[in-house]
């Protein structure tokens, strides 16, 4: 069964009247000037004002808002800090935004059980800061960790530079408390190592706010390693750098982090951060080892051997914690650094098998010529997660459409190479057409049946993540392989 696609028509005055009955005045925004900050998330190319923004301060208020919207048939888009890059938090024109920004308390840090219980509006980095006195930290570390929130991390199954060894959000969350669109509260998972029944925890994590609204998260904490060091390797050839990534994993080494940046990325980052990157290199790899001093020394030795054999022309090993953090600061600052050298950029997120990295990098270089746009590449190379940054100027007619087509070709090539259209940013509205390439009708129908089981009216974040079969049929008719889309100048649906 597929979820319905109603033509939502909401009476704004009636909606505002109902919401004013359940929320204090300071928890409800209805004027356009107050709604404007919520019109988009980090994917700023797509914008839409909602009818209202709700800022609840308690779970009871969340329940009341959801029940009211369910009764009125009003779409609801849950929102955290708005740092997402796939348009997952873009409002619905006939709906409300349910902001969890005021759910920002760390409820408990249990050093013996190595877990923390937090509200969804808590910043990612704040969890590690709270756990630091106990020698613990929260491992998933997206580049936006100083701002992004745990609720958004759960919605998008966020990763980070250390996800190769420590896993994505789904590997580090033990339990979530969720409110359904009908206002019912249920808990998924537990503080125990496992829970009986279907693995609904993995289903909810990464569901992009389409199945329920998270009000509490229990996360795993891990001990801070005694030592960590980073090897920075320079390569004269991008393909060799890509091959070196596969060589490291093939050697049985699982680094704490394994990241790659091409010359365009390092050229943007170095003046911004002064991380000490080799600006002559066609690409650099950052490979981190952590653990006891003995473990780190052994792993660093093995890694350097592999990198030398792979053709690295220069190797540097961080000699202090400050230098290690500086190496990583450059990688984490890649997005804002590119923003300094181009009017606009489009950050992609696809995943491919590690052994195909070199092939993909070569293809992206060809696409730069095809579309007449520059592209800087940063990768969570260890798990094949790509983040090409396509540079364009939105003020120039047609450039955004070319950037969008460039991105679509990268995503569809990711699928063709045996990968996925996303690794950690989610689908949102950005990649919804490429879902039609990733999956066939039976898989999409299964997704729709799951959506219907949780939200039979299709009110939670409608139009995101899972395309309708009609949409896929339309995209199939307009789509030409290898990224050549007919009538590129026309508005996309």
Image (cartoon, rainbow, N blue to C red):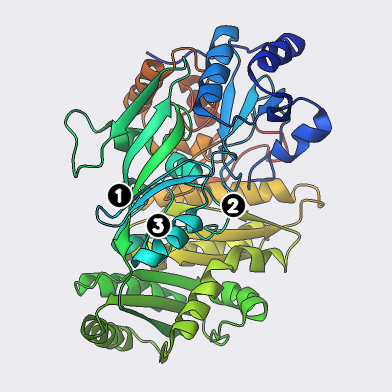
Q: How many marks?
A: 3
Residue matched to label 1:
171
Q: Residues within 10 Å of mark 1 (few under 14, many from 20)?
A: some
Q: Residue 379, how many percent across, how many down? A: 46, 64
Q: Pointers 3 and 2 in contact (CB under 8 A)?
A: no
Residue 484, image quadrant: top right
Answer with mark 1 or mark 3, whichever residue precedes in sequence. 3
Quadrant (top left/top right/bottom left/bottom right) for the C terminus: top right
Q: CA distance from mark 2 to mark 1?
A: 32 Å
Secondary structure, mark 3, is loop
The residue under the point 67% across, 11% down is 18
Query: Where does label 2 land, which residue?
Result: 406
> What SS does tag 2 mark?
helix
Between the C-alphas of marks 1 and 3, the distance is 9 Å
Q: Which of label 3 and label 2 is nearer to you?
A: 3
Q: Earlier in the sequence, mark 3 or mark 2?
A: 3
Disc 2 vs disc 1: which is toward the camera?
1
Q: Earlier in the sequence, mark 2 or mark 1?
A: 1
């Amino acid at each position: 069964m597929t979820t319905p696609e109603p033509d939502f028509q909401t009476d704004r005055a009636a909606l505002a009247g109902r919401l004013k009955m359940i929320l204090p005045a300071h928890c409800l925004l209805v004027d356009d000037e107050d709604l404007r900050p919520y019109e988009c998330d980090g994917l700023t190319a797509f914008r839409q004002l909602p009818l209202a923004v709700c800022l609840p301060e308690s779970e009871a208020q969340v329940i009341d808002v959801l029940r009211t919207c369910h009764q009125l048939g009003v779409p609801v888009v849950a929102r955290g800090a708005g740092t997402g890059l796939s348009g997952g938090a873009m409002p619905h024109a006939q709906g409300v935004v349910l902001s969890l920004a005021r759910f920002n308390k760390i409820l408990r840090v249990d050093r013996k059980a190595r877990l923390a219980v937090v509200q969804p509006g808590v910043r990612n980095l704040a969890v590690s800061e709270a756990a630091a006195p106990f020698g613990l930290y929260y491992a998933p570390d997206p580049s936006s960790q100083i701002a992004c929130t745990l609720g958004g991390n759960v919605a998008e199954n966020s990763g980070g530079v250390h996800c190769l060894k420590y896993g994505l959000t789904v590997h580090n969350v033990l339990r979530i408390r969720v409110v359904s669109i009908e206002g019912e509260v249920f808990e998924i998972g537990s503080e125990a190592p496992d829970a009986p029944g279907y693995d609904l925890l993995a289903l909810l994590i990464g569901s992009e706010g389409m199945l329920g609204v998270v009000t509490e998260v229990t996360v795993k904490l891990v001990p801070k390693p005694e030592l960590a060091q980073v090897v920075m390797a320079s390569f004269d050839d991008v393909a060799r750098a890509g091959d070196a990534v596969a060589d490291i994993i093939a050697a049985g080494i699982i680094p704490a982090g394994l990241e790659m940046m091409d010359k365009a990325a390092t050229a943007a980052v170095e003046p911004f951060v002064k991380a000490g990157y080799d600006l002559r290199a066609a690409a650099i790899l950052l490979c981190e080892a952590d653990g006891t001093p003995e473990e780190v020394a052994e792993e660093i030795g093995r890694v350097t051997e592999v990198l030398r054999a792979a053709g690295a022309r220069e190797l540097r090993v961080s000699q202090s914690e400050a230098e290690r953090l500086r190496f990583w600061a450059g990688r984490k600052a890649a997005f804002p650094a590119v923003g300094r050298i181009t009017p606009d950029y489009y950050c992609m997120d696809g995943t491919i098998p590690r052994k195909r990295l070199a092939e993909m990098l070569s293809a992206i270089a060809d696409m730069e010529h095809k579309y007449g746009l520059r592209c800087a590449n940063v990768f969570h190379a260890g798990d094949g997660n790509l983040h090409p940054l396509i540079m364009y100027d939105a003020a120039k007619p047609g450039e955004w459409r070319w950037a969008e087509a460039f991105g679509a070709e990268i995503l569809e090539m990711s699928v063709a190479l045996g990968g996925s259209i996303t690794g950690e940013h989610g689908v949102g509205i950005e990649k919804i057409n490429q879902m039609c390439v990733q999956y066939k009708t039976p898989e999409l129908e299964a997704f729709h049946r799951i959506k219907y089981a949780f939200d039979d009216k299709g009110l939670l974040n409608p139009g995101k993540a899972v395309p309708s079969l009609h949409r896929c049929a339309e995209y199939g008719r307009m789509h030409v392989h290898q990224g050549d889309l007919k009538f590129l100048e026309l508005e996309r649906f």
